[in-house]
Amino acid sequence: MRKRITIIEDIAAIRDGFVAALESTEKYHVVNAYGNCESALLNLHADMPDVVLMDIELPGISGIEGTAKIKKELPNCIVLIITVLEDSEKVFESLCAGAGGYIVKNSNIENIGQTIDEALRGGAPMSLSIAKMVVESFRKQPNSLLSDRETEVLQGIAAGKSYSKIAQDLFISKETVRTHIKNIYRKLEVTSKADAVRIANENNWVNTDRFHSSPIVPPKR
Amino acid sequence: MRKRITIIEDIAAIRDGFVAALESTEKYHVVNAYGNCESALLNLHADMPDVVLMDIELPGISGIEGTAKIKKELPNCIVLIITVLEDSEKVFESLCAGAGGYIVKNSNIENIGQTIDEALRGGAPMSLSIAKMVVESFRKQPNSLLSDRETEVLQGIAAGKSYSKIAQDLFISKETVRTHIKNIYRKLEVTSKADAVRIANENNWVNTDRFHSSPIVPPKR
DNA sequence: AAAAAATCACCCAATTTGGGGGATACAGAC
DNA sequence: GTCTGTATCCCCCAAATTGGGTGATTTTTT
């Protein structure tokens, strides 16, 4: 059974290139190719693609919004972003929208088949430079503004803990926590938890602590 | 000027291999090689390495703890983790500890020079499979337990917002937010913000929204 | 028709929060 | 030797928040 591919790309030449490359294979079948997201979304349930090749810069609905919409309609469909430039913000937004991989356009149009294979096998195909961009963002940059202790307290706030709980966890008095908070507010020039957490997030001062030994999902109802 | 390298690796054969490979170059000089972190840390300020090659599994202080200690003492020193197995949890912990790259041991000992070069140029050298591991963790897994709206509310909680602020931002009444919170608590079987945020984080239900256009650091005092 | 989901309202008491005012002790820096 | 920053702790006060009830209506989904 050939995998069903939908292509969304506004430049006809590139679009046709992908169609030709994929139609020449045994494994893939391009069910449709569109110049914008709107028309692709209209025919989504008719096309029923296994994989969507999505340009990121499109007239009208962007590739990122389009990815989100497609994943909402067809959660099992794999959306691969194709783009010329590697914009860190767009990379992240696409991954959040549910993109399954990130392909730089002029890199390897001939081995597009391999890339799709990898995505279908559950991998996340992307160039090393793209992957690094995401990895870089993980690296907590040192925070000279807040002291170590203040950062610890702020982490507690970001975790939704009350002052009492933070005090308990850090083995200090609640009053000490309050003093730290006051100093944090003074340094960050804010007057509320929400603002402090926002600034901490904007500067990646917080430990998001991904990679947990075993995710704990509570029972369903 | 040859770059100063320190090696921390408990298996003598591997350690000697790295020393030999690096000493044969013009660009690098191995100032010292240790079998554990403790002795390396004692001589850290004498060695003053530009780059540390750090094994992750060591007797005594682990490579991850060691990385954190080294970065605290010498923030400009680049620590590259060398390991045999690709453990997602350890990868993340090392990056958090301040590791500048991740090298799989038996892969390319001969082009170790290129890897170090890349790290010195500001890159984050690592195999594609390692990078993907981190990227994968970014992909928010769908959350069938909480509704979309409930997830939005929980995001507000994680952002440190009060019920009123969340209501304001979502254009709904404070009472509605309270109802959503009650339902969240029921579904997650918790009774506090901190617990709800903890479970949300453990299951990666939250949007950490990295990649900001321009980090906003408030003025220094 | 039944079940979720999303919206809003009112009651209550305990807790939290933000702001103000202090204090002590220990580091480094100048 | 004084000054600054850090970390710790204490008190007061008033407003806001929070968690727990018990209701309700509407829309959407199944």
Image (cartoon, coloured by chain):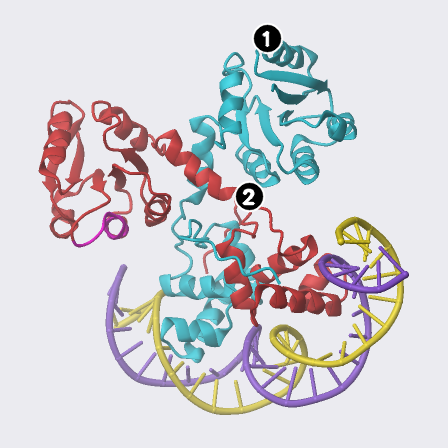
Chain colours: A red, B cyan, C yellow, D purple
Between label 2 and label 1, give the one nearer the viewer. Answer: 1
Element on which disc 2 rests: loop
Q: Is residue B145 visible?
A: yes
Q: Nearer the viewer, residue D10 or B3?
A: B3
- Residue at coordinates 68% horizontally, 64% vertically from top-left? A165
Mark 2: few/some/many CA within 10 Å (<14, 14-19, 20+): some
Residue A190 is drawn in which quadrant? bottom right
Same chain? Circles 2 and 1:
no
| 3D distance between C-alphas at marks 2 and 1 | 41 Å
Please tell me whether the stretch drawn in magenta is mainly helix, strand or loop: helix
> In the rendering, at what x and y percent does residue A69 appear?
24, 53
Q: Which mark is residue B24?
A: 1
Looking at the rendered structure, the kind of residue marked 1 is: Ser
Determine the chain carrying the residue at label 1.
B
Left or right of A171, for residue A127 = left
> In the rendering, at what x and y percent does residue D14 appear?
64, 90
Determine the chain carrying the residue at label 2.
A
Q: Quadrant of the C terminus of chain B?
A: bottom right
When the figure is inspected, residue A174 is found, relative to residue A84, above or below; the finding is below
Left or right of C17, for residue D24 = left
When the figure is inspected, residue B166 is found, relative to residue B148, above or below; the finding is below
Q: Is residue B16 magenta?
A: no
Element on which disc 1 rests: loop
The residues colored magenta run A60-70
> In the rendering, at what x and y percent does residue B21 appear?
59, 10
> In the rendering, at what x and y percent does residue B79 appear?
61, 30
Residue wearing tag 2:
A212
Q: Nearer the viewer, residue B195 or A106?
A: A106
